[in-house]
Amino acid sequence: MPPLPVFCLIGFLCTFLLLPAKAQDSLRIMSPDSTAIRTPAQDSLQKAQQDSVVSFLSAAALDSLRKIHNPRRAILYSAVLPGLGQAYNHQYIKIPLMYAGIGTAAGIFIFNFKHYTTFRDAYRLRLNGKYTQDEQINLYSLQDLKYLRDGYRQYVDYSVLGFAAAYLYNIIDAIVFAHLYKFDVSNDLGKVRFGPVLHQEDNYVGMGFTYTFKK
């Protein structure tokens, strides 16, 4: 029969060897990440949280990558600088046309205003019995100067209206095509087919055209 110290030594060794395994098992049971004590409700809750996070990140990524075309921004750009709204709509070919229209209206206004001021000053001097330094203008009579002054003053008003119309057209064009930015304007809008057509109400077959719109 072995002595008592030998049994004590054997028991101490067994305790020392089994203690780490038991400690690991207890930690595994008490760990909140372990699946041993997780309930289906906790699993569904964690899955829902993960899905919500993934959907939120996906939506944020799509919003950052997708360029949202805003018609209000097109209006603001065109009002601040003519042609900038057309650039925002990616219609760069219209920019020279917008500047040509506004520039023409501005040139006509400057031309009419210059002649208006010339005949206006000449008419005022002629009322006081004086003449201008331009000999050709001095050939006109007082009534002619008054007629030319009134005529060019009316042309100036028309020029202002023309300039305002060109400027307003620039804004309207930008907002209209901003709304139609994602509208399909290609020629392939549908299909036309000629062939037999079944009339279910009257139960007979005839010939006709069928047009199918493109989605």
Image: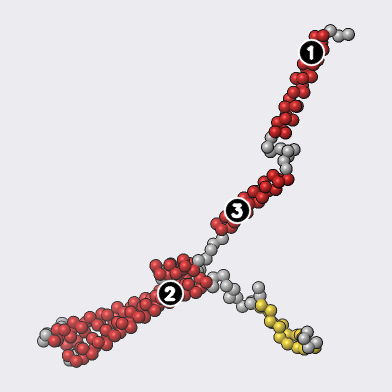
Residue tagged by mark 3?
56
Please give the name of the residue rendered at 69% of the width and 38% of the height, measured from the top-left corner.
33
Which of the numbered marks, if any, corresponds to residue 170? 2
Image quadrant assignment for residue 168: bottom left
Image quadrant assignment for residue 42: top right
- Nearer the camera: disc 1 or disc 2: 1
Point out residue 92 in the picture as x, y percentages from the top left corner.
48, 70
Point out residue 68 in the picture as x, y percentages from the top left corner.
53, 63
Please give the name of the residue rendered at 78% of the width and 88% of the height, measured from the top-left corner.
202
Q: Nearer the viewer, residue 190 or 122?
A: 190
Q: Does residue 210 show up? A: yes
Which residue of the protein is positioned furthest toward the left in this rendering?
A: 129
Which of the numbered marks, if any, corresponds to residue 202? none
Please give the name of the residue rendered at 20% of the width and 83% of the height, measured from the top-left corner.
120
Contact between marks 1 and 3 (CB within 8 A): the answer is no
Q: In the displayed structure, would residue 49 be above or below residue 180?
A: above
Helix, strand or loop for disc 3: helix
Which residue of the protein is positioned furthest toward the right in this rendering?
A: 1
Residue tagged by mark 1?
9
Q: Left or right: 67 with respect to 140?
A: right
Q: Left or right: 93 with respect to 121?
A: right
Point out residue 84 in the picture as x, y percentages from the top left corner.
44, 68
Helix, strand or loop for disc 2: helix
The alpha-carbon separation of the residues under discs 1 and 3 comes to 61 Å
As shown in the figure, which amino acid type bears the numbered disc 2? Asn
Q: First in sequence: mark 1 or mark 2?
A: 1
Q: In the displayed structure, would residue 68 be above or below residue 4?
A: below
As shown in the figure, which amino acid type bears the numbered disc 1? Leu
Q: Does residue 100 show up? A: no
As shown in the figure, which amino acid type bears the numbered disc 3? Phe
